Image (tube, helix red, strand yellow):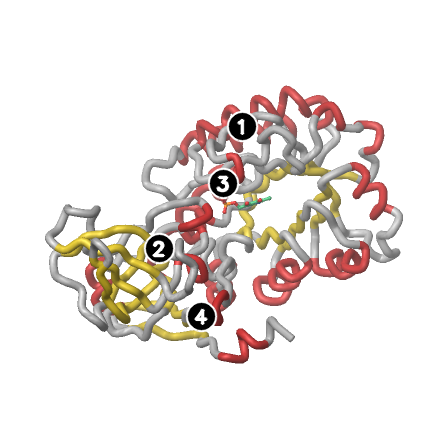
Amino acid sequence: MPNAKLTPISQILADLSEVETPCYVVDRGLLEKNLRVLESVRERTGCRILLALKGFAMFSLFPVIAKSLDGTAASSLHEARLGFEEFGKEVHTFCPGFVESEFEQVLSFSDHVVFNSFSQWEFFRDRVPAGAGGKKFGIRVNPEHSEVKTAIYDPCAPFSRLGVTRANFRPEKLAGISGLHFHTLCELNADSLARTLRAFEAGFGPVLGTMQWVNFGGGHHITRPDYDVDLLCGLAAAFRDRYGVQVYLEPGEAVALNTGFLAASVVDIVDNGMKIAILDTSAAAHMPDVIEMPYRPEIAGAGKPGEFEYTYRLGGLTCLAGDVIGDYSFPEPLRIGSRVVFQDMAHYTMVKNNTFNGVKLPSIAVREGEGNIRVVRRFGYEDYRNRLS
Ligand SMILES: Cc1ncc(COP(=O)(O)O)c(C=O)c1O
């Protein structure tokens, strides 16, 4: 992918001042910038990189992403189908528990299927239909080494259901298994991968000689400015050489990091000890990680409370008392109709949003270049109704 000149963020924000709200807008140039970083990792290490659909599944951009990456990582039948039909290339599916009635379809869409336990492997091994010869099967393991500080995002937390621990690993049941998978990281740098690999190799190194591939999962924040890409490349290349395996990475967040915006408008301003602006979006419905993670999204041109003259609490459209995005200050007072643009809103937003309270889902748009925003999807009443009966 050629090294295109990047548009200044001020130009992107100027373009966003015209877009309908609420609307997620992903900037194609910023996405391509991330893809160039990921391409360089592929080229330097020979590893294959999959887009984890759970993090980002905006399929109108799959043709762009598919030029740089090797396929998709799915976590359900529907994600596997989306990857197969819309992305092409390789589809790798892991699920904590495959359901018997769906398995044949999962298999039909997937190149790799990764099981979370030996009992699932033994159950489905005998249900692989004849003619599925080219499919590859793997086991997810739990290296029991925690790097993630927030327990709900830590697959190695005590009593985690994710991955086979060393004590439960059964080398005698590996016939038919060609690879191992681990996923232990979340928004972490390569030093966390280095420590994880040591734990992984200490536990499972003895069987790696019989494996063809190893999947290092996601959570690698590769496209963050301070990410140590050299360390990642060194680790991946050395691992490949040590064991003679194909290395896979399956980031979600790193593909779409800092590429998207959620444009919203102020619909009312009320006062209860402080000014509270109600927006035409919602933390609960449109950016659930703000509440779940929790985190405070950045807003272009706004600061912490008191940093600028006018401070507001920003709240959402649902009746959940906690549907609050946070407290922010602005250099100018907000008015009804004022535009508020949340940054870094591409990943874990559209894939997680919901229609709680019947709140309308944000439109989805691509910013193709200067002054050129293309709305690719609008949602309406039917999208709400079709999820109910
Ligand atoms: C198995 C697996 N692979 C990949 C990912 C993608 O992680 P991230 O979006 O943090 O890169 C996740 C996220 O939870 C995951 O569970």
Using the rendered image of the protein, determine whether residue 322 is visible from the camera's viewpoint: yes
Is tag 2's residue or tag 1's residue first in the polypeptide sequence?
A: 1
Dot 4 alpha-carbon crowd within 10 angstroms: few under 14, some 14 to 19, many 20 or more: some
| Three-letter code for the amino acid on which mark 3 is drawn | Gly
Q: CA distance from mark 3 to mark 4?
A: 31 Å
For discs 2 and 1, the disc positioned in front in the rendered view? 2
* Mark closer to the chain start, 4 or 2: 2
Residue drawn 21% across the image and 67% down it? 14
Q: Quadrant of residue 131?
A: bottom right
Q: Position of residue 56 (x, y in %)?
A: 49, 56
Residue 146: numbered disc: 1
| C-alpha distance separating marks 3 and 2 | 27 Å
| Label 3 CA crowd tier, 10 Å (few <14, some 14–19, many 20+) | many
- Lower position in the chain sequence, tag 3 or tag 2: 3
Q: Nearer the viewer, residue 308 or 324?
A: 324
Q: Is residue 315 left or right of residue 338?
A: right
Q: CA distance from mark 4 to mark 1?
A: 38 Å
Q: Cβ–Cβ below 8 Å for labels 3 and 4?
A: no
Q: Nearer the viewer, residue 134 or 271?
A: 271
Occupied quadrant, residue 383: bottom right
Q: Which residue is mark 3?
A: 219
Q: Position of residue 309 (x, y in %)?
A: 10, 53
Dot 3 beta carbon under 8 Å from ligand 1: yes
Query: Residue at the top extreme?
Result: 202
What is the distance, in whole Å, between disc 4 and disc 2 at their CAs? 15 Å
Element assignment for label 2: strand
Q: Which residue is mark 2?
A: 324
Looking at the figure, which quarter contains the C terminus?
Answer: bottom right
- Separation (CA) of disc 2 from disc 1: 31 Å
